[in-house]
Image: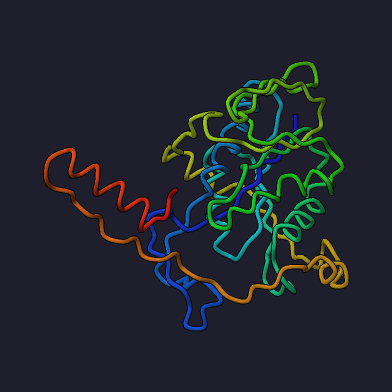
Amino acid sequence: MKIVALVKQVPDTETKIKLTADGKALETAGIKYVVNPYDEFAIEEAVRIKEKNSGSTVIAVGMGPERMKEALRTALAMGADEGIYIAEENLPGKDGLITARLLAEAIKSLSPDLVICGKQAIDDDEGRVGPALSHYLELPFVANVTKLTVESGKLNLHRELEGRTEVMEVALPAVVSAQKGLNEPRYPSLINIMQAKKKTINELKPEQLLSNDELNKLSTLEETGLNLPPAREKGRKLQGDPEQMVKEIVTFLTETVKIS
């Protein structure tokens, strides 16, 4: 099997986010970047499938600035065999559709049996690269997968829905997105980290995949500004007997929060 695992680099969840002076972008200085957690599930599952199917190959594919190669090296250390890096500099705009289209163009020539990605990125929370990618590749798509097995050219899948689990069977090739619970991503060993440095990462530029006219047509998103969420208000500690505290809570909910 040939498996493609998508990789995105995102700010660490513990990083304190700041905006640039014009409020139109993130201040990148001092930010620690990591592999998107949902993509870690995708990489791990791809490697597990490879380990169960002799002769299989895992290719990690990612798009971003130069530092994106660090995330691809992490995927290689986890067990991917090679990487493909798409530089995002000089794009006319960037959103999930442009990303999906460029990824699709890079992936088409690989003719993979399975493409697996995280269900969403934790920085923009768009969650549309997976379904858009399946559209451009003209392959079936299953989202939020929590269990996956490969048998006789088909995928047997579980995915979590509200209050229930849906069981599906999908013919390969296909695109799936990984949800938390699919697996427990491994920590790369030191020897695997060292070996990853010797593995190949092929670099592509957007203009090698699409013409500028095509990229401009895809650019539909204009960012006019970013806002940080309001600071969380300080908590209030209630004192007194239980009856009095209940009255204060009810008053707060009805008069301040306006819950009827």
Whole-percent x, y for residue 127 in the image: 65, 49
Q: Is residue 186 above or below residue 69?
A: above
Residue at figure coordinates x 69%, y 66% from the top left: 94
Q: Is residue 39 left or right of residue 4?
A: left
Q: Is residue 106 above or below residue 169?
A: below
Is 71 in front, or is 38?
Answer: 38
Count of picture labels:
0
Q: Is residue 23 left or right of residue 54?
A: left
Question: Which residue of the protein is positioned furthest toward the bottom in this rendering?
Answer: 22
Q: Is residue 201 left or right of residue 229?
A: right
* Image quadrant where one finds the N terminus: top right
- What color scheme is it? rainbow
Quadrant hosting residue 168:
top right
Is 170 in front, or is 65?
Answer: 170
Whole-percent x, y for residue 80 in the image: 61, 39
Whole-percent x, y for residue 106 in the image: 78, 52
Q: Is residue 168 left or right of residue 237?
A: right
Residue at figure coordinates x 53%, y 38% from the top left: 78
Residue at figure coordinates x 63%, y 35% from the top left: 144
Residue at figure coordinates x 54%, y 62% from the top left: 67
Is 257 in front, or is 141?
Answer: 257
Whole-percent x, y for residue 22 in the image: 52, 83
